[in-house]
Image (spheres, rainbow, N blue to C red):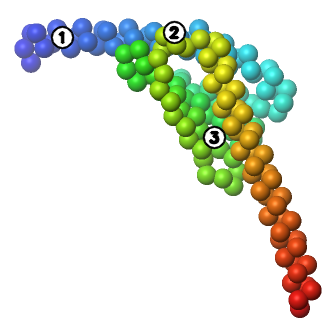
Amino acid sequence: MNKWKEQFLSKLNDAQGRHETEFEQALDETVVPAFEDLGSFLGDNGFQISTPLRESGRRSFKFELSENAYVLVIFRFSGIGEFEMRTETFVPGREPVLEKAVGRVGDVSVDWAQNAFQRALDSFVEILAEDNAGGKKNKDRAAHADEEELVIA
C-alpha cells in the first residue's frame, strides 16, 4: 500500500472513531438517563431492567417481566452520524416481534429516548394482552368443545 493510502486510511479511521465516540456520548448522556428514569417505576411493577450488551458501538437495554417475556432495545452505531435501533419483543407462545429504525445521532435527546422506550413497552404490553386474551379464548373454546363432545356422545 502506498503512503497516500496509508495516510488516508489513518485519517478515515480517526474520523470514524470520533463519530463513534459521539454516538457513545449520546447514549451515556441521553439514553441511559431515560432508561434509569424508567427503572424504579418498572421495578415497582414487576420488571427487571438491565443492560446485557455494552461494547463499543453497541448497547442493549432489557425490560424483563419474566424469563421469556421481555423487550430488548438495541442501539448500534451504523455510520457517520447515524445509528440503528432494533426492538425485539418476546412473549410466550408468540413469534418474536422485531422492529428496526435508523436515526441520526444529533436527533437523540432524553425525551426522544424516553418516547422510544415507552413505545417499545407499550407494544410489549399490547402483545402480552393479546396473547392472554387469545389464550383465554382458546381455553373457553376447549371447554365448550368438551361439553359438545359429551352432549354428542
Which one is earlier in the sequence, the residue at label 1 or at label 2? 1
- Give me the C-alpha separation between circle 2 and circle 3: 26 Å
- Give the distance between the C-alpha atoms of the residues marked 1 and 2, in whole angstroms: 26 Å
Out of 54 and 45, give the one closest to the viewer: 45
- Residue 134 in sight from this viewpoint: yes
Secondary structure of the residue carrying numbered label 1: helix
**Residue 28 position within the rendered picture, expressed as x and y whole percent measured from the top left:** 57, 11
Residue denoted by label 1: 8
Classify 10 Å Cα crowding around label 1: few (below 14), some (14-19), many (20 and above): few
Secondary structure of residue under mark 2: helix
Q: Mark 3 or 1 closer to N-term? A: 1
Q: CA distance from mark 3 to mark 1?
A: 42 Å
Residue 32 in view: no
Query: Which residue is the site of mark 3?
Result: 89
Residues 76 and 128: in front is: 128
Q: Amino acid at mark 2?
A: Gln
Residue shown at the point (26%, 12%) measured from the top left: 12
Task: Report helix, strand or loop for mark 3.
Answer: strand
* Few, some or many residues within 10 Å of mark 2 (<14, 14–19, 20+): few
Q: Which mark is residue 25?
A: 2
